[in-house]
Amino acid sequence: MSYRNKTYVAFASEDIHNYRLMTAWRANKNIDFDFTNAHDIYQARDTSTPETIKRRLRERLNNTKQVVLLGSPAARLKGSNSSSFLAYEVGAIISLGLPVVVANLDGARRGRSGTNIPAPFADMDYFTMSVSFGPTIIKYALDQYVPEFNSSDKTGPYHYNESVYDSLGLNKK
C-alpha cells in the first residue's frame, strides 16, 4: 500500500463552494491552514463512467490519512443514499478505518447525526470528531484528533469542549 499522507475532503455536490473555500484558506498566506489535498490526484471527469469515478475515489482514499467531511443536510442525505458517490466514499472511509473530522457548515460544534452526519457513521457508532466550519478548529482537530483516533478504541461522535474553542480564540467575548 502506498504511503498515506493526504487529507480527503468529502462533501455533497451542493457544498462544493465550501470545499473551494477550504482550498482558498490553504492558498492564503495569512491563514494558518494547510493540507495535502487528496483531490489533487487521480482526476475523474464528469464524463467518466460511474465505475471509473468510484475507482478514482478509492485510489484517492487509499492515499488518505484523514478525512474532513463537510457536514450538512445534503451530506447527510447523500452520504446515506446508497446510490450516491458520497455514500460510496463514506463506505470506503469506514472500510479503510480513516479518521473523520466533521466540519459542520451550519456552525454547530457538536455532531448532529439527524442533521449533518451520514447515517452509516452513526449506525456503526464510528469515532468521529465534530467541529464548526473554520480553518483554526479544523486544523486543530486534524492535529489532535487524528493521532488519538489511530491509538484509541473510542466509538461514537465526539466534539470539543468550549474550553478548546476559548484556547483557540474562537469564542466571542
Image: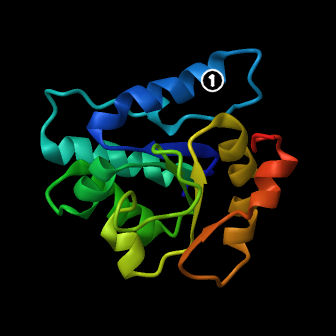
Identify the residue shown where x is 46% and y is 81%. 125
Please say which color scheme the image uses. rainbow
On the question of residue 155 being in view, the answer is yes
> Where residue 54 sits in the image (x, y, percent)?
25, 48
> Is 157 left, or right, of 82 in this rendering?
right
Q: Amino acid at mark 1?
A: Trp
Residue at x-position 34% and y-position 72%: 120
Callout 1 secondary element: helix
Eyeballing the image, is 3 above or below 17? Answer: below
Quadrant housing the C terminus: top right
In the image, what residue occupies the spot 71% across and 31% down? 33
- Residue 171, image x, y percentages: 75, 44
Task: Left or right? Give the position of 35 relative to 88.
Answer: right
- The image quarter containing residue 154 is bottom right
Q: In the image, residue 7 lies at what x, y percent? A: 57, 44
Relative height, residue 12 to residue 111 (above, below): above
Q: Position of residue 42 (x, y in %)?
A: 39, 34
Considering the image in quadrants, where does the N terminus appear? bottom right
Q: Is residue 112 above or below residue 43?
A: below
Depth check, front residue: 104 or 53: 104
Which residue position holds label 1? 25
* Depicted 125 relative to depicted 33: above or below: below
Question: Which residue is at the front of the view, 27 or 129?
Answer: 129
